[in-house]
Image (cartoon, grey):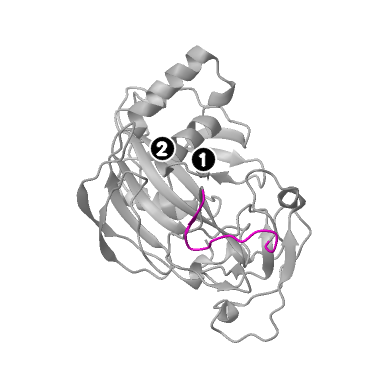
Amino acid sequence: MKAVSRHWAASVHVALSLIGLPYAAGTSGVWFVQTISSSKKAISRSFFSSTSVYMCSAAAHVKARCPVYPGSDTHRFPVPDHTVDWDTDCPQYSPVKYTAPTVLNKPAWADPEIGSFSPQFNSIDGSVDRRSHEGSYRVQNGKPLNPHGRTGLEGRGLLGRWGPNHAADPIVTRWKRDSTGQCVHHTNSQLPVLQFVSIKRLDCGEWAIPGGMVDPGERISQTLQREFSEEALNSLQASPSQRENIQKRIAELFNSAGLQVYKGYVDDPRNTDNAWMETVAVNFHDESGNSVSELPLQAGDDAGQVSWIDVDSSLALYANHLHFLETVAKERNAHW
């Protein structure tokens, strides 16, 4: 990230519910670490405390103001830092209108245009959850407003939903080991080196954490497992016997305790004034290296490449994925 985040710390006490991962209230996103215990049918309902990390405001709204909207020749209306906030008077603000043709073609995963239907914002609207992880957002002239401010572009761009578009990012890690099976320590920090499963996105060529959109009515825990198996292990193309082995190994890892490291707004170049990405990022760690680590990685349809990559602060990753990894590394006392 080019911008420097403002940090704040908070202690959060959250109850895990049967319908998904814990909800964290906040006005500008929440960075935190908490332990998640899941089972095949439900997520643990026990209480726990978590101490956490940091969050930002306008500083986490940089890629969402990129000059040229991805996948198009559309240039955003320039938005300097001091005019990002909706409460800042900006009479000259004239955002460019753009919704990608793929979205306007009315695929099953996209909303219709405002006017042809009446979405119930800030609530569960049929099978679509239009609530934000960050609390209530404004609706102006029938359209939701990006909770992090102006982006220079109105409409939905490449995003299907008006308002929050919910995703889930599984961060699968293991310890880097040498030929004898011993953990490798970094020469400078002397701390053990983590590796994570990363995919190279086909749409922009950047390396990223594998993840994807939460389907209507789907639990976040289901999305995490599904997206990892499809993007990093190409389970959709596997034979029945291979798929069974993949699902068994994944279940072993994803039914273990996980660390939820972030829940909130994503500084994504696809964001607009009226549609934006939000995610839940959860770390699943293969401590012994005999679970998912033994499965051969194979890129799915949405990924160009997939690989185990050393976790390091010098990495250049998609959106704010680097910050997710920083939280994981520090929580597990690994090299950063």
How many numbered circles does the render carry? 2
Which region shows up in magenta?
114-126
State the CA–CA distance, disc 2 to disc 1.
9 Å
Name the residue: 36% across, 51% down.
261
Instruction: Find residue 306 and report its horizontal and vertical position in percent.
Output: 55, 33
- Asked where in the image residue 133 lies, by quadrant, the reply is bottom left
Decide whether the magenta segment is chiefly helix, strand or loop.
loop
Q: Residues within 10 Å of mark 2 (few under 14, many from 20)?
A: many
User: Residue 208: x and y, percent?
Assistant: 54, 45
Q: Is residue 5 magenta?
A: no
Question: Three-letter amino acid code at disc 2?
Answer: Val
**Contact, mark 2 vs mark 1 (Cβ under 8 Å):** yes
Q: Is residue 313 left or right of residue 98?
A: left
Identify the residue position indicated by label 1 in the image.
210
- Residue at 67% from the left image edge and 71% from the top image edge: 152
Under mark 1, the amino acid is Pro
Give the number of the disc on residue 198. none
Question: Mark 2 or mark 1, which has the lower sequence index?
Answer: 2
Is residue 260 visible in the rendered image? The answer is yes
Viewer-nearest residue: 87 or 79: 87
SS for tag 1? loop
Q: Which mark is residue 172?
A: 2
Q: Secondary structure at mark 2?
A: strand
Is residue 119 magenta-colored? yes
Residue 177 appears in the picture as rendered: no
Please indicate whether residue 86 sits to the left or right of residue 183 in the image: right
117 up-or-down from 237: above or below: below
